[in-house]
Image (cartoon, coloured by chain):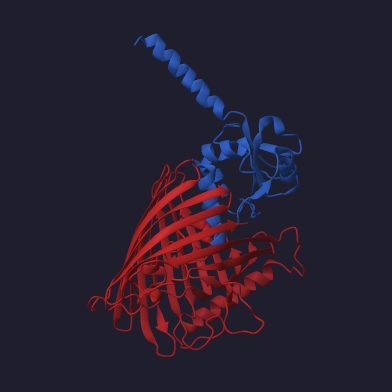
Amino acid sequence: MPKTFISIVLFFTLFITTNAFAGVVIIVNKNNPIINISSSELKHMYTGELKLWDNGKKISPVVLKDSNPTAIKFVSSILGIDMETWRRYWAQKLFSGTATPPHQEKDESSLVSYVSSESGAIGYVMKESTNNSVKVISVDGKSEF
Amino acid sequence: MKRFFGVFLMMLCTIVLYSGSAIAISMDEFKLNGFFDLEYEESYQDDSSIGDRKGAFDQYHFNILMEFPLSDNVTVKGHIEYEHSPKIEGGGGKGEINLEWAYLEYIINNDIGIRGGSFLTPFGIYNEIHDATPTYASVRTPWGIYRADKVGGFVMIPKFSTGISMLGKYYTDGDLNLNYVVYISNGENTDSNEAEADDNSNKAIGGRLMISPIPGLTVGGSYFTGKKGTTKDNHSTWAGSAEYTIRNIGLRAEYASSKLADTTQNGSYGEVSYRVLRRITPYLRYGMFDPDDEGDKDEWSELVYGINYELQPNFIIKIENRHFNGNTNNAKVSDDYNELGAAVAVAF
């Protein structure tokens, strides 16, 4: 198989892979001083392991409905699991009394509103859904993923 | 030990009183969740009289969880269970109402938290979720460990504990995660309500450690020790567990050993499940139980196989066949028989 052909296939594979999750940003309340977190911290916030910000405020992760494409992308890319596993994980956490599942919003605009009004909130939306009422933070130095 | 317990309780109260002076809690912060299930079971082995040959529906659980945050790091949590649709009027012991848990949780920092009150005893994989049927594939928990009293033994651990527990965690930026919980409680009573009094001066202690060295794998160990009720018999139990999830395959295994006075019993099981078409999960479990390691022909075993179907998010249908095999000297199941079990379970 010619090397050129393999190179073209690899290039398009890389392009498709990168683009599949492009455009999702992490937002926090404007008053939150944080500007960057690690992907590990983000994961632990959404699995209920990390409960307080450095300033002692409660971390309030917020999610979109399970069927939302942005939610599916977020759960698979950040947590590395599918939505069914995510649901079962949280059911076990909730019903064992270990942690309370993230607050859920019906769409991206209401999620942005929630984050803008909750001082400890953190959420994910497509880049085009953000506005000046919230702050976009980077994850491992990257502003979108 | 008593002094330590008293000081600990005082510290907890001081911390909570200091943390806030809330008179009323905003209902915006109040959270309500729960689960419901309806079961059907019928034994159908022609040559055995054990089990329910008539078949019956069982409105098993209607459970309500409540959460009242007092501040960013102080929360009161409650969980009320209505089991078998209890009928208060007329009494007669029909059904049960249980306060599964009611505790105050204080999160000191991201690594340590303290709970005071009644809680489900942290033990193994299933005890804290034993009633929450939407959270596991099968209709029932593995009885060889979690309902040993139903298969010829004694309860391995008290389902509920009242006292104080400390929860901690450690994680790295890599894959390693570690969770632990240790507790001190009234332990097991024979006469009084464990949530109100202690039948003896001994306090039970226990704990659980769970480690996830790589994604998908969790191994853990649990321990409980105390004196039981007014007889003050020594009771100690330990368990080891392993869970591994890789893609759609789930593997789970546990072993527990419990000694009460002079009797030692052992239980174990292995489970495998495989999720297909996203929401259909066939599963298989084999469990064993030996109610007395010095007894003869008293062992019990189960082979359970079934299908779990998530019809829509948080709405689950289950159907399984259980083959129980009890040896002739087993006090509860001295024969082998089959049983059909089915359930609809909803989490909300």
- Depicted A20 relative to depicted A133: above or below: above
Asked if residue B329 lies left or right of residue B30, the reply is left
Asked if residue B347 lies left or right of residue A110, the reply is left
At x 69%, y 62%, the residue is B71
- Locate residue B84, reporting x and y percent: 57, 72
At x 51%, y 67%, the residue is B166
Question: Quadrant of residue B117 in the image?
Answer: bottom right
Residue lying at the far front of the rendered structure? B46
User: Which chain did the renderer colour red?
Assistant: B
- Depicted B311 relative to depicted B163: above or below: above
Is residue A44 shown to the viewer in this render? Answer: no
The residue lying toward the viewer, choosing from B302 and B134, is B302
Asked if residue A31 lies left or right of residue B102, the reply is right
- Depicted B72 relative to depicted B213: above or below: below
- Locate residue B58, reporting x and y percent: 54, 68
Is residue B98 shown to the viewer in this render? Answer: yes
User: Which chain did the renderer colour blue?
Assistant: A
Question: Quadrant of residue B32 in the image?
Answer: bottom right
The residue lying toward the viewer, choosing from B139 and B208, is B139
- Locate residue B290, reporting x and y percent: 29, 72
- Locate residue A30, reporting x and y percent: 72, 42
The quarter of the picture where the C terminus of chain B appears is bottom right
At x 31%, y 75%, the residue is B334
Count of numbered circles on the image? 0
The residue lying toward the viewer, choosing from B324 and B45, is B45
Question: Quadrant of residue B118 in the image?
Answer: bottom right
